[in-house]
Image: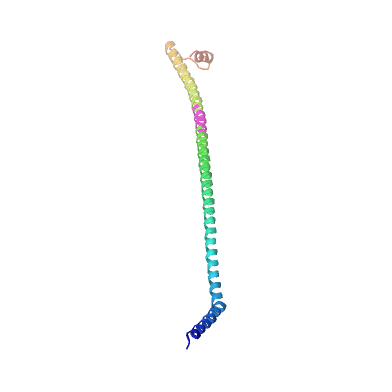
């Protein structure tokens, strides 16, 4: 065989193989590579989108946490103010109640003192009459001398 014929046959076989490869083998490989590249690009885009969504969600969570902390601080401050006002109100009521009790006790003590004075006057009057009776050695009638005894009570 001739070198030219072999070379020519190899060129023809190469061209047929090249045509067959370009017509039937290369398009599915290219299509698969393009699909794979598209999937990778979609995955990267989804990952970037997820990163943005995650950072936005983290930002929203931080804002909500800050707002919740602020609200909790306000509620605690309000509760402390309310507790303080309740304590102050209770102290005020206790002071008022103590003042009432003291006033009642003073009034009761004054009343008892007046009663004790009256009882003491009665006893002094009785003792004075008994003393006068013994001095005079005769009986003094209390009903007869009521006016005298009343004057004696008022003077004491």
Question: Residue at the spot x=52%, y=60% of the render?
Answer: 47
Q: Nearer the viewer, residue 140 or 58?
A: 58
User: Residue 22 at x, y = what percent?
Assistant: 55, 77
Q: Nearer the viewer, residue 68 or 119?
A: 68
User: Residue 55 at x, y = what percent?
Assistant: 52, 53
Q: How many marks?
A: 0
Q: Is residue 95 magenta?
A: yes
Task: From the image, give the main secondary structure of the stretch colored magenta.
Answer: helix
Compared to 111, does 8 lie above or below? Answer: below
User: Residue 64 at x, y = what percent?
Assistant: 53, 49
Q: Is residue 4 magenta?
A: no
The quarter of the displayed image where residue 30 is located: bottom right
User: Residue 132 at x, y = what percent?
Assistant: 44, 12
Q: Nearer the viewer, residue 139 or 48?
A: 48
Q: Which residues are the magenta region?
A: 92-102
Compared to 95, does 143 lie above or below? Answer: above
């Amino acid at each position: 065989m001739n070198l030219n014929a072999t070379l020519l046959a190899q060129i023809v076989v190469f061209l047929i193989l090249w045509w067959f490869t370009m017509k039937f083998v290369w398009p599915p490989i290219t299509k698969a590579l393009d699909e794979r590249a598209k999937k990778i690009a979609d995955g990267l885009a989804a990952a970037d989108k997820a990163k943005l969504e995650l950072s936005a969600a983290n930002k929203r969570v931080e804002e909500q946490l800050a707002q919740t902390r602020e609200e909790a601080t306000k509620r605690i401050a309000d509760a402390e103010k309310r507790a303080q006002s309740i304590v102050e109100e209770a102290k005020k009521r206790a002071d008022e109640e103590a003042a009432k009790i003291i006033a009642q006790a003073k009034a009761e003590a004054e009343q008892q003192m007046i009663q004790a004075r009256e009882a003491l006057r009665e006893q002094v009057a009785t003792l004075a009459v008994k003393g006068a009776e013994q001095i005079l050695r005769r009986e003094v009638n209390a009903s007869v001398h009521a006016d005298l005894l009343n004057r004696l009570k008022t003077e004491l």
